[in-house]
Image (spheres, helix red, strand yellow):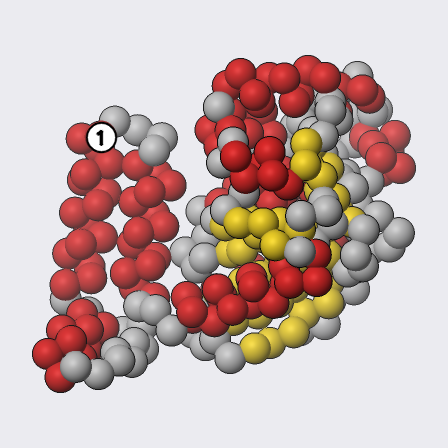
Amino acid sequence: MEYTKLTVEREDGYVVAALNHPPANAMAQGVLLDLNALLDECLEDGDVRAIVITGTGNKLFSAGADITEFAGYQDGTKPQINGVDVYYRIERYPKPIIAAIQGHALGGGLELAMSCHFRFMSSSARVGLPEVTLGILPGWGGTQRLPRLAGKTKALEMMLTGDPIGAEEALQIGLVNKVFPREEVLDEAKAFAARLGKGAPIAMKAILRAVTEGLETTIAEGIKIEQEGSLMCFVSEDAKEGSTAFLSKRPAVFKGK
């Protein structure tokens, strides 16, 4: 498939998609449409078991929503596609998605990264939700995901002041998984995606669903979701391959069946 606002590279077991909307990689309609199409394409492709999302250029992962498009919506006109819907879909995607934050991630850019399952960040990058300085709020899931990742108090501080934070603080508060020098971020994310790409797809899908949906309900309901996934895994060929490989003392080769 051809993309106009993404640069997509296919690797063994995973895909790398770079936001390509200079100069700021703003989350314009074209970018959101391309991301949504990428999710469609990868969902149907059994050879793609993980996705890495990054940005073109070194300075910016994404500076956020395209402010120039906002003026057109103030009269009540609805956008063709809404960022909150795309991000919600990413959060619930059945294959792991890694954000490689090689540059600053602000506003909708950070909201995109927070919707991913993992975040690797450059030591020189900064992240923040500055929407309050424009008289608006983070409206693509930021008010909900940031407190869940970083805690209520820190999230309120970041959103009410609009001040960004650096990589070490982002790591300390649990907003990102790992921090690397800028030139290593993408390579590390790709290595992690390659590792996940060799994992058991059915089990990973079940884990992603159990954790994501389970955190939004009671532990009793979460355990029900867990058990549904467990039953699905136990009858799979992957489970048979896993136990056979273990007993044979060889690496398992999972096929997602």
Asked whether 150 or 144 is in front, the reply is: 150
Q: Quadrant location of the C terminus?
A: bottom left
Q: Quadrant of residue 110?
A: top right
Image-based side of 102 in relation to 190, left or right: right
Q: Can the viewer see residue 131?
A: yes
Residue at the image point whose x is 50% and y is 19% from the top = 152
Asked whether 245 or 86 is in front, the reply is: 245
Q: Quadrant location of the N terminus?
A: bottom right
Q: Where is residue 128 drawn, in percent x and y?
A: 69, 32
Asked whether 235 or 126 is in front, the reply is: 126
Q: Residues within 10 Å of mark 1 (few under 14, many from 20)?
A: few
Amino acid marked by disc 1: Ile
Residue at the image point whose x is 60% and y is 17% from the top = 156
Q: Where is residue 202 drawn, in percent x and y?
A: 30, 64
Q: Where is residue 35 drawn, in percent x and y?
A: 65, 56
Q: Which residue is mark 1?
A: 219
Q: Where is residue 7 drawn, in percent x and y?
A: 73, 67
